[in-house]
Structure formats: C-alpha cells, structure tokens
Amino acid sequence: MGITTLIIARHGNTFRKGETPTRVGARTNLPLVEEDRSRAIGRYLKGKGLIPQEVFASPLIRTVKTAQLAMEEMNLKQEVILLHEFTEIDYGQDENKTEEEVLWRLGNGDTEKGKAIIEAWNREGIAPAGWQVDTEEIIKNWFQWAENRVNKNGENSCSLIVTSNGIIRFAPCLTGNFENFTKNNDIKVVTGGIAVFEKRENDRFWNCKAWNVKCLS
C-alpha cells in the first residue's frame, strides 16, 4: 500500500536582522536576504530521507529561490513547478505596513483590540477586515493539489511545495479537522519552517506527521 508524503515549507527571511518587518503579501515581491534557512530545509529533508520527486513553489521571488536553494542541498536538478494558486494572500490596506500600523488600523486606534484580531488570525485563520483572503478557495486548492499528488499505482511518492505563511496556515484542513488542529497547534509557521503530511491509499484525510519544524536551529 503506497504512502503519499507532502512536505510544505515556508520561504526564508525577507528582512535582515535589525530591519523593521512589514506585512508582505502577494503584491510585494521581495527577494531573500539570506540563504541559510532555505538551505537548511534541503539539508533537513536529505537527512530524514525525504527526497521529493517533484518540487513546487508559488511564483514569488522568495518562494522560488527558497525551493531552488533547498534543491541544491538535495542535489535535485529538476525545474521548480510554479503554482499561482498558492501565491500569498493580499493584505489589502495593511500591505507593506509595520505591525504597529496594522494593529492601530485593525483596532481603530486601540492596539489591544488590534492584537486580538491578529491573534484570531494566527489561532483560527479568521482573516481581518480589509484583507483579501478567500479561505474556501485556499482550502479547495490544498485538497486538489494534495489529491493530485497521490500515486494511483500504489507506489510511494513525495512532493515539496514552498509557499507563504498566509497560505500554509490552512494546510491543516487536509486532516479533516482544522478546528481540532488549531486547539493543539499554532498555525503560524516560522520562516524556513516545514510541515509533513502523509496519506495511505485508503485513507480519506491526511495525517500531519510534523508541523512547524524549525530546520535551522
């Protein structure tokens, strides 16, 4: 009975130490500022024997470069397959704004209210007002992509996808119980972090084998 393995990785850093980070979404195509986290993904997967047969990435500089650097560490030569449906969300009015500015706007001048709204986003995936997030579409895309990775010949397969934080947080829907998952896990994944999902031939949903693994310690 074949096992399908999905490796989901968040891209590396786009801000240098000491820089003030902003909300970087689909409309902000920043490059990586370091390679360590991306290469650490490849070294970690190679050490665990999780070598993907195919590698995907959303079509942003930061995600594609992360995939390429990870592949170099695994000695993989194939091309990265671009998936536009996994491009990061659009933060709307908060795109490229500092966290302080975001909290102020969301809380209508009350940063504590703003923090509660962001906590709901990080805890339950409830998108703040003004952000362009089609949750149902993102979840549908995860299920469709995952199902297309299943090898119908009963053989094991392994795929890697590199995308962004706003997209990755909905991947646990693959388990069939997102609400229960959020009770036990922080759905925000660190830069350069990975998650691993597995599914056997006759399973309906996916088993999360690892979540928010920090490849670079």
Image (cartoon, rainbow, N blue to C red):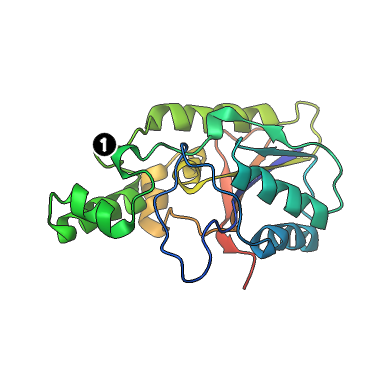
Q: Quadrant of residue 45?
A: bottom right
User: Which residue is more in the foreground, 93 or 118?
Assistant: 93
Q: Quadrant of residue 35?
A: bottom right
> Above or below — where is 112 with respect to 137?
below
Horizontal and vertical percent position of residue 77? 87, 43
**Number of callouts:** 1
> Above or below — where is 65 with respect to 132?
below
Horizontal and vertical percent position of residue 181? 42, 50
User: Which residue is more in the foreground, 134 or 94?
Assistant: 94
Q: Amino acid at mark 1?
A: Gly
Q: Which residue is mark 1?
A: 130
As drawn, is 21 to the left or to the right of 98?
right
Q: Residue furthest left?
A: 109
Mark 1 residue crowding within 10 angstroms, few (<14) / some (14–19) / many (20+): few
Q: Residue at x 62, y 30 (%)?
A: 83
Q: Residue at x 85, y 47 (%)?
A: 76
Secondary structure under the numbered disc 1 in the rendered image: loop
Q: Quadrant of the C terminus?
A: bottom right
Horizontal and vertical percent position of residue 38? 67, 57
User: Which residue is more in the foreground, 196 or 163?
Assistant: 163
Q: Residue at x 64, y 65 (%)?
A: 215
Q: Residue at x 75, y 26 (%)?
A: 152
Q: Quadrant of the N terminus?
A: top right
| Residue 198 visible within the image | no
| Residue 208 visible within the image | yes
Q: Quadrant of residue 61?
A: top right
Horizontal and vertical percent position of residue 33? 60, 59
